[in-house]
Amino acid sequence: MLAMIAFPYTQRKAQAELDTVVGRDRMPTLADAPSLPYVGAVIKETLRWRPVLPLGVPHAATEDDWYEGMFIPKGTICLANSWHCNRDRAVFGDDADDFRPERHLDEDGGLSSGPLETNQAGHVSFGFGRRICVGKDLAQDSLFINIARILWAATLERVRDENGKYVPLDTDTLVDAGIIT
């Protein structure tokens, strides 16, 4: 919702894709996902730009370990900083802080697989390696159907003041701790 309100051009572009592929006679279904690469890119970019769990799920070291010269005692709580990983300029470029769904599209406008550093997902919001979220496919399908249908059915806009002017929206100073607040 925040991204669509903050970036109305992105919303209009996703809605144009929905109008072209789905039309107005029916709502989008999961079967439409392969034909809606821009909507898919919006979802990937939303997960990258504002991960639900910015610090991932806590894990504990099950035994003493050394990592890159640092001792990690058994029982140490370890957090994967998804927020930082999703903004790694070496992976996502100098505009890593920006919301830009196009980064997830290939030269033909199709949905691309992401960088190897993200397990080709385009973000690390579902975790890493063998500890990756087991529900990621269900979550992605749920996000697709809900976002596609909201964009198909409605246009989201910023609130207007008593004079009809848009109230300023600051996407940088939000309290954004995901679902852990």
Image (tube, grey):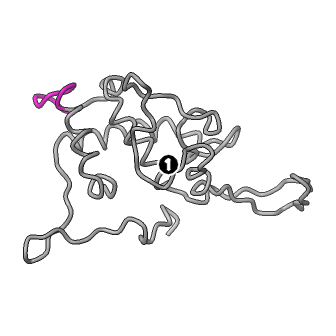
- Residue in the picture at 59% in, 39% down: 134
Residue depicted at 52% across the width and 29% down the height:
113
Count of all numbered marks drawn on residues in the image = 1
Q: Secondary structure at mark 1?
A: helix
Kindly identify which residue carries mark 1.
48
User: Dividing the picture into quarters, in which one does residue 93 lie?
Assistant: top right
User: In the displayed structure, would residue 166 be above or below residue 94?
Assistant: below
Q: Position of residue 49 (x, y in %)?
A: 47, 52
In the image, the segment drawn in magenta is: 19-27
Tell which of 26 and 49 is nearer to you: 49
Residue drawn 60% across and 54% down?
Answer: 82
* Residue 106 in which image quadrant: top left
Relative to residue 159, is residue 30 depicted above or below? above
Q: Is residue 78 above or below residue 12?
A: below
Provide residue 39's location: percent of width, then percent of height. 33, 36
In the image, farthest residue toward the bottom = 162
